[in-house]
Amino acid sequence: MSYIQAIVLGIVQGLTEFLPVSSSGHLLMLQHFFGIEADSVLIFTLLLHVGTLISVFFCYWSDIVELVKELVITISDLIRGKGLRLEERPVRKLGVMIILASIPTAIIGILFEDLFEGFYQTLLPTGVGLIFTGIILWIAQNNRRNKTQIEEMTWKHAIAVGCMQGVAICPGISRSGSTLFGGLKSGLQRDFAVKFAFLVSIPSILGSLIFEGGSDAMSSAMNTSMGPVIAGCIAAALSGVLAIKTMITVVRKLSLRFFSFYVWLVGAALIIYTLLK
């Protein structure tokens, strides 16, 4: 893989991981049109996720530090028999909700692993997934009067977000778009919904790194030139920061339907291309 290809893939990964247009779908398309075999870029794809993880840490560093601090205090409280006291500790409650949202995602990923892997064999499921993404974004835009913040959040909100994140394992279905849809449709306030969608991506990305990284990844790493990989990872991190900040602005002031039109156009073109090929 050349440096240019790596940087292009990194930029696309960073932008599409957090803009609601599906990073998996766009990477699959680029690999197809670049003529890159998926197995040959296994370690590269994994490290692109590291780049996007860096983006989340950069944009939500203060929140993440508070969550870590609260985890230490929570362990101390449990040891001393004080209980969770979620209603008294909003940051603690946020951490618990992130954990709860990650559970259905993990279950869906494990139970339907073979099915999801089959979707990556051709581009047709990606096109269908993009159409689906456009539909849920269009529906999500209607939810403008949601008021639920972390203080009123319940396990039902977390499960809704986690289930939608699990569905997004399919190529073409946006993870950020799906989790945002789950949050908005369950009643979360718009600013909080986008924040929760990005924070809940942390265990999801870490889980994919652990689950997909193994002996095959290490073998791939031994045969991979690390220069392009590092360049792509940096590009993913930088473009990811831009995408997160853009997404926050869009959710606050603009319309998600702009993204609906985009994914519908790309999805329809991909379906037609696949059927006529």
Image (spheres, helix red, strand yellow):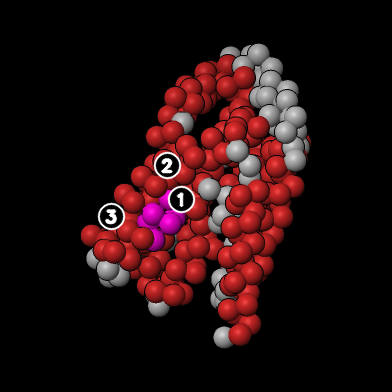
Percent x, y of residue 193: 64, 34
Query: Residue at point 43% right, 50% down?
Result: 14
Kind of element beneath mark 2: helix
Instruction: Report how far apart the C-alphas of labels 1 and 3 lie in the structure.
Output: 17 Å
**As displayed, is residue 147 above or below residue 81?**
below
Identify residue type, mark 2: Leu
Would you say the magenta stretch is mainly helix, strand or loop?
A: helix
Query: Residue at point 60% right, 38% down?
Result: 254
Q: Earlier in the sequence, mark 1 or mark 2?
A: 1
Kind of element beneath mark 3: helix
**As displayed, is residue 171 above or below residue 60?**
below
The magenta stretch is 9-14
Q: Is residue 221 visible?
A: no
Q: Nearer the viewer, residue 102 or 55?
A: 55
Position of 26 with respect to 185 (left or right) is left
Query: Residue at point 59% right, 79% down?
Result: 274
Percent x, y of residue 183: 69, 38
Residue 15 badge? 1
Which quadrant of the structure image shows residue 133? bottom right
Residue located beneath label 3 in the image: 230
